[in-house]
Amino acid sequence: MQQSTVYSLATGTVQRQSQAQARVVAGSKSLASMLPTILTTGLVSLVATAVLRLMWMGWGHDFMGAWMEAWLTVWPIAFPAAYISKPLVNKLARRLSKPLASEHALGASTIMQASKQATARSGLTRKPSLLPVHR
């Protein structure tokens, strides 16, 4: 197991810390790693249940009780579903947001060239533009 040395300027002491410990803390299933998902699912389910309760029941005598009952039923289902699916969703988001290779990308110059070719093939002439065209 590798160890790293940390020197504290304040106390003038040397502390040794194993890198395995640092990795375990960073990838832990602690409350701190769950907190963004807890807060997000809590807020979204709170708003969604409020809107749906208003649509279904209106602002009546038992709105708050029915809303809290719905929220406390939905949130314990939404949080584990979101937390468990988070790695899959992150992987999908990375795959969808990966930039295309330049040969497959559609740039402004490619569009302008295709427009010129289509105009020439159809026997039309291009009307002069009032705005300058940057090439």
Image (tube, helix red, strand yellow):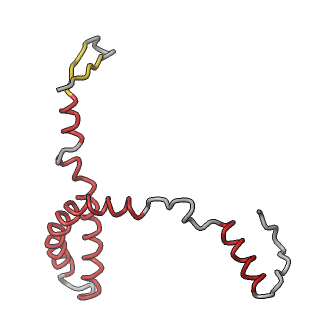
Q: Where is residue 37 in the image (x, y as percent from the top left)?
A: 25, 58
- Give the residue displayed 54% in from the left and 65% down from the top: 104
Quarter occupied by the N terminus: top left
Residue located at (17% from left, 48% from top): 29
Instruction: Report which quarter residue 134 is drawn in.
Output: bottom right
Give the camera-side residue of 58 and 45: 45
In the figure, 94 relative to 28: above or below?
A: below
Relative image position of residue 28 (x, y in whole percent): 18, 44
Q: Of residues 101 and 47, which is closer to you in this image?
A: 101
The vertical placement of 18 against 9, above or below, is: below
68 relative to 127 in the view: left or right? left
Q: Give the residue displayed 22% in from the left and 47% down from the top.
A: 32
Q: Where is residue 40 in the image (x, y as percent from the top left)?
A: 29, 61
| Up/down of 98 relative to 112, above or below | above
Q: Quadrant of the C terminus?
A: bottom right
> Picture quarter containing residue 5?
top left
- Spot occupied by residue 81 in the image (x, y as percentages of width and height): 19, 66
Instruction: Give the side of residue 98 with respect to residue 71, left or right.
Output: right
In this view, the residue farthest toward the front is: 121
